[in-house]
Image: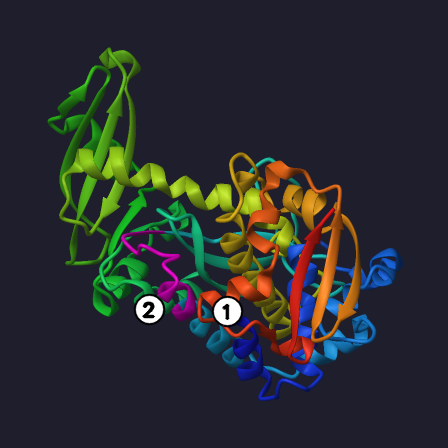
């Protein structure tokens, strides 16, 4: 994907400098679902530092200093360039995008407002993040972060700017927290995207739900729509209401606000269920670095999470080479079984680093994709020399 060039672009350094290799270490730590590999001597002894073209592993202090060199804007530029790379590689369809204000438990020692991750959970320190996901390919597009005290509108709109790189007219599936007059107004003004957002069950909507004329789509399910105005606004939107139940005494209603011109039944049955792909993403990929935060130095955390985003993109491509069911393993399972679960040794033969892997299950199909790697890459028109490994080639043996 050109990851190495992205890291050199961020750091302004060359193939032979130290800084891009620290970033590479963070990416590989993320792929291994470990935030502190530096404390695991057994991995150092197995040559993890060599994977990044380093003689030793960078310490926690060196990593913090490295991440702290760059601003939020510089990391955002890195993210934009990654989006462009992924779009070229076909990782996005861009027709349906899910957004989510994902709260991450923070272990910062700073005094912070505490919030609840779930209604019945205890209030904890939180890092607020705002994720965009291509709901069709289930791949993250971008994210933004902020302290727990900030209003979600500005960071969400800032993250939405990146969606323009992927598509100009997607359907945006949002959370109930985005049921907001200003959000709808600014999205309508600034983008051509269509919004579909669950409406808050206020008195006005509850009265409207019961008086509408419903179209039955199938037994026990019907939809209706009406024109809706936010209080104090002249801008109107479509209110879509779905009704479930067989008898009037047990009807259940759920309302949505939308700027889309698609049929109500199409929006409810085909599009909105895709909203839950973003929850699956956090469940399956959270261990890469999207599920905990130890600092409120926002640029440091933002930088580290962007390294996790690079790792996730690489894992997506890696999964394309795995047969079922291994290609559907979550990130932690993949790391346990493959990246940290395969024994091996490393040696140099001429201009090639040879990694011999032992007892690898044939069902993984790794030998068919990674044996004779230099020749495979050359046949595809790719230079087999690995820049961060000082132009050595890389090959694998499976024994």
- Residue positioned 61% across, 88% down in the render: 13
Q: Is residue 394 left or right of residue 278?
A: right
Which mark is on residue 165?
2
- Where 398 sits versus 65, above or below? above
- Residue positioned 22% across, 57% down in the render: 232
Locate residue 41: give its quadrant. Answer: bottom right
Q: Tell me, yes or no, if residue 147 can be seen here.
A: no
Q: Is residue 385 left or right of residue 214?
A: right
- Residue positioned 43% across, 42% down in the render: 277
The answer to the question of whether label 1 and label 2 lie on touching residues, with beta carbons closer than 8 A, is no
Nearer to us in this view, 333 or 345: 345
Circle 1 is placed at which residue position?
A: 378
- Where 149 sits versus 209, above or below? below
Nearer to us in this view, 115 or 127: 127
At numbered mark 2, what does the secondary structure look like: helix, strand or loop? helix
Q: Tell me, yes or no, if residue 285 can be seen here.
A: yes
Q: Return the x and y of residue 89 as percentages of the image width and height.
A: 39, 62
């Amino acid at each position: 994907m050109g990851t190495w060039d992205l890291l050199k672009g961020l750091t302004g350094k060359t193939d032979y400098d130290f800084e891009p290799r620290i970033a590479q270490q963070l990416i590989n730590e993320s792929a291994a679902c470990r935030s502190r590999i530096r404390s695991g001597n057994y991995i150092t002894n197995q040559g993890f530092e060599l994977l990044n073209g380093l003689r030793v592993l960078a310490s926690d202090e060196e990593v913090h200093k490295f991440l702290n060199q760059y601003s939020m804007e510089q990391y955002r530029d890195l993210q934009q360039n990654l989006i462009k790379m992924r779009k070229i590689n076909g990782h996005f369809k861009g027709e349906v995008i899910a957004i989510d204000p994902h709260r991450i438990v923070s272990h910062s020692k700073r005094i912070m407002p505490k919030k609840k991750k779930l209604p019945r959970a205890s209030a904890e320190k939180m890092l607020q993040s705002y994720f965009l996901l291509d709901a069709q390919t289930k791949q993250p597009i971008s994210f933004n972060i902020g302290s727990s005290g900030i209003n979600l509108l500005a960071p969400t709109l800032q993250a939405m700017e990146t969606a323009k790189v992927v598509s100009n007219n997607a359907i945006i599936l949002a959370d109930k927290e985005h049921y907001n007059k200003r959000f709808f107004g600014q999205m309508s003004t600034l983008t051509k995207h269509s919004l579909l957002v669950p409406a808050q069950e206020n008195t006005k909507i509850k009265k409207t739900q019961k008086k509408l004329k419903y179209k039955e789509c199938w037994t026990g399910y019907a939809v209706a729509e009406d024109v809706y105005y936010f209080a104090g606004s002249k801008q109107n939107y479509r209110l879509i209401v779905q009704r479930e139940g067989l008898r009037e005494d047990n009807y259940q209603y759920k309302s949505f606000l939308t700027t889309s011109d698609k049929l109500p039944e199409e929006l409810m049955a085909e599009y909105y269920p895709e909203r839950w792909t973003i929850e699956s993403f956090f469940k399956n990929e959270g261990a890469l670095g999207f599920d905990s935060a130890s600092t409120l130095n926002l640029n440091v955390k933002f930088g580290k999470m962007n390294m996790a985003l690079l790792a996730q993109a690489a894992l997506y491509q890696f999964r394309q080479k795995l047969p079922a069911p291994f290609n559907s393993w979550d990130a932690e399972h993949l790391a346990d079984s493959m990246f940290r679960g395969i024994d091996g040794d490393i040696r140099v033969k001429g201009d090639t680093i040879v990694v011999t892997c032992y007892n690898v299950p044939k069902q993984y199909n790794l030998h068919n994709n990674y044996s004779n790697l230099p020749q495979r890459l050359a046949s595809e028109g790719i230079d087999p020399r690995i820049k961060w490994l000082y132009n050595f080639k890389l090959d694998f043996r499976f024994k």
